[in-house]
Image (tube, rainbow, N blue to C red):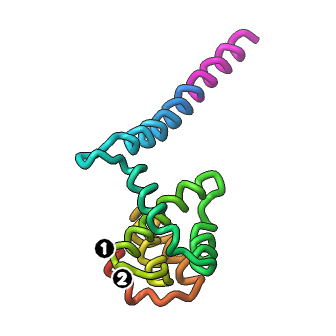
Amino acid sequence: MQDWFMWFIVFWCIVLVGLFGIGGYFMFRKFLKVFPKADGKSTLDWEEHYVNESLHLWNEDSKKLLNELVSPVPELFRDVAKQKIASKIGQIALEDRAKTIDFDHIIRGYIVATPKRDHKFLIKKLTSMEVDMKPYEHLFE
């Protein structure tokens, strides 16, 4: 009985150390995004800036499209993904001096904001939405 309990305690110690390590890794990544860059603003500050500056450019159709694009993201991370993608879309629209955010801005921002490791899921989603990928192939490089 004592040997079984000892191995149970050792197993849980290993599991807890592993979970703390994984949690610490993700917390550290979030912590690094808060540090100011050379221009004095952090990555999160810039994301918030682009979202706020482009807020008036969004219409109901573009909001629905953005929600459709982030639907494959697990619900726990969906708000963070939506913020990051919306900020990149806003940045692209502001650089283009657009009057409204249109389909092209959304697709370009979605591709640019998505990490390279997730491009296969992105392509699968865009293909299921019957989006022509030819004009956007250069963004996948």
From the viewer's side, name the closer residue of 120 and 48.
48
Q: For residue 61, which quarter of the picture?
A: bottom right
- Residue at the spot of label 2: 137
How many residues crowd around disc 1 within 10 Å: few (fewer than 14), some, or many (20 or more)? few
Which residue appears at 23% of the width and 46% of the height? 38
Q: Are marks 2 and 1 in contact (CB under 8 Å)?
A: no
**Image spot of residue 86 (x, y percent):** 49, 66
User: For the magenta stretch, what is the residue range?
Assistant: 1-15
**Image spot of residue 107 (x, y percent):** 47, 78
Name the quadrant of the N terminus.
top right
Which residue appears at 47% of the width and 59% of the height? 84
Identify residue type, mark 2: Glu
- Residue at the spot of label 1: 141
The label number, if any, that marks residue 36 in the structure image: none
From the viewer's side, name the closer residue of 43 and 19.
43
Q: Residue furthest right?
A: 1
